[in-house]
Amino acid sequence: MTGVADGESVSLEDLRKKMVEFAKERDWEKYHSPRNLLLALVGEVGELSEIFQWKGEVPKGLPDWKEEEKEHLGEELSDVLLYLIQLSHYCGIDLGKAALRKVHLNAIKHPVNLYRGSSEEKSNDINDNINININSETV
């Protein structure tokens, strides 16, 4: 049971509150230092990586995957997300705001007119100029 109706969205704040409550009920807060949470997160990323380890390139949507494989993937992705949310909470970082800020910075660093359709860096001069602009702009 998820406690969320189909089609209903869940915010990072909803998840953060649930995880704080979950840890508090079990008296686990004393173990949730940033270091411990980071190490747990790295472990979960390792478990997530194992799912893809020997599959080669995987097409979007995972059309050839069994339902059980997709469910397992969802569980591991969730573990990573939940530890990341907890880590940000215990570090005093608003993860949603930090992510939006990062998207904005990436848009400045990689403008559409210079990077559309390319994953390659265009030139060091462009990046140097963009870095100067990012550092001097208040975001």
Image (tube, rainbow, N blue to C red):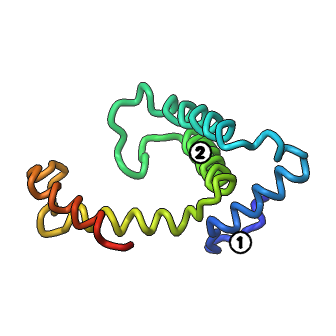
* N-terminal label among 2 and 1: 1
Spot the residue most to the top: 54
Against 99, residue 56 (above or below) is: above
- How far apart marks 2 and 1 lie (CA) works out to 23 Å
Considering the numbered disc 2 on the image, is that residue within a helix, a strand or a loop?
Answer: helix
Give the number of the disc on residue 5: 1
Q: Residues within 10 Å of mark 1 (few under 14, many from 20)?
A: few
- Amino acid type of the residue tagged 2 in the rendering: Val
* Image quarter (top left, top right, bottom left or bottom right) of the N terminus: bottom right
Residue 60 at x, y percent in the picture? 37, 50
Which residue is found at the position 75% from the left and 60% from the top?
A: 2
Residue 42 at x, y percent in the picture? 57, 35
- Amino acid type of the residue tagged 1 in the rendering: Ala
Which residue matches tag 2?
Answer: 80
Which residue is found at the position 9% from the left and 54% from the top?
A: 125
Residue 81 at x, y percent in the picture? 59, 51
Q: Would residue 100 appear left or right of 43 to someone viewing this image?
A: left
* Image quarter (top left, top right, bottom left or bottom right) of the C terminus: bottom left
Q: Nearer the viewer, residue 65 or 90?
A: 90
Q: Nearer the viewer, residue 89 or 14?
A: 89
Which residue is found at the position 57% from the left and 32% from the top?
A: 47
Q: Mark 2 or 1, which is nearer the eye?
A: 2
Q: Would residue 13 appear left or right of 77 to someone viewing this image?
A: right
Against 104, residue 118 (above or below) is: above
